[in-house]
Image: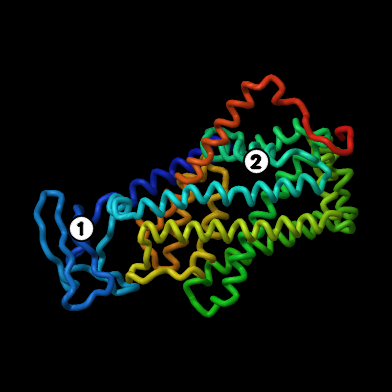
Amino acid sequence: MQWLIRLVGIALIYLVVTNVDWRDSVVRADLTKLRGEIVGEVPRKWDDASRVRFRELAGEEKDYAAADLHADQATGVPEVNEGIVRIVKRSDWGVLLAGVLAFGLITQIGVLRWWLLLRAQDIRVPYGTACRLTFIGFFFNNVVPGPTGGDLVKAVYIARHSDKRAPAIVTVIVDRVVGIIALALLAAFVLVFKLDDPRYRELAAFIGIFLGGIAVAAMLFFSRRIRRLLRIEGLSGKLPGGGIIRKADEAILRWRDHKGAVGVALLLSFANQICIQGLMVLFASALHVTTSTGDALPWTAYMVVLPVAFIVSALPMLPGGWGIREAAFAVCFHYVDVDRNPAIALSVVNGMTMLFWSLVGGVYFLIDRGSKDSGAPTATGNSEAPR
């Protein structure tokens, strides 16, 4: 199954790479597509006097008016496509660099969230340890190929640092779930004010189904009456690995008594996601991302589109979500009239930023591998025998 998932991810990368326009192109009125290079600027607001100068691959240059070009049926804008190469060349590299550095600071919100969840279970690891293990998780999520995900590696490491192994491992799951829920709730909040816009209805349906599914799953899992009716405790003991399942089940149920900690984690997740989306708006500004009509994309559009794209790209196909993230960005940004090429360029910048910071986790991992006592428990707090 893992290999099948990887093959799907590779297929998505192939589709993205082969369908994206690396070079500039224009589509003439007779539907002939020419590839080459746009000379100068592309008119953002087309009228009868607007012209775009285009140099074909053979070297021939020609000015094209709106009447010479095929117009997009939805927007009426002539099809002049800026390729990935042009988008990257025209980007503001200083702003991109500032965004990459800012991402390292934003990650600390996520580290703090997990550290507080650990403390809620009386697992007292130093903040620096939580930070180190978080970056090691980044490394395995974004760099290392294979079935071993970053959350699994982080769970194994934190279990080694605590005598409360089951609760420690479950904090990784809770941390991940709370972050995804916050992401979807932010989109839902903005969508409440956008339901009259037909462009957002399919995205609203996705978010609604996603949150509804989580609500139903939580109700079924945490309801004492339903658990007794389904005899969950007895059933878990009969499954393969039933002992481990029972311990994890008991550890998750303990979070019913830590609603305050979950609430704080949810607030930190909101702050984390708002910062990340602000960072993506900064990247979009550096890449000069606009709608197909040349208008700036409002921040509310990012608040809706990005959560859907990030939720989809969280599917474990390839390290870092490569392939599925680019496809998700292309599809989701299409709903708000952003062309495929700038949307994919934005996705690639996001992926490269995470890849850069994941290398910090690689350094931590190599240091841990070289440490003789890296697997020794170091946490303090109330002792509890593993169950």
Instruction: Bin the neighbour count of mark 1 within 10 Å (Cα to Cα): few under 14, some 14-19, many 20 and up.
Output: many
Total numbered circles:
2
**The quadrant where residue 181 appears:** bottom right
Report the amino acid beneath label 1. Ile
Q: Is residue 318 left or right of residue 249?
A: left
Residue named by callout 1: 38
Residue occupying the point 85% across, 48% down: 232
Drawn side of residue 116 relative to residue 53, left or right: right
> Quadrant location of the C terminus?
top right
Residue at left offset 57%, top offset 72%: 191
The answer to which of 40 and 64 lies nearer the viewer is 40
Q: Which residue is mark 2?
A: 131
Residue found at the far top of this picture: 372
The image's mark for residue 229 is: none
Nearest-to-viewer mark from 2 and 1: 2
- Report if residue 129 is visible in the image: yes
Q: Nearer the viewer, residue 107 or 157?
A: 107
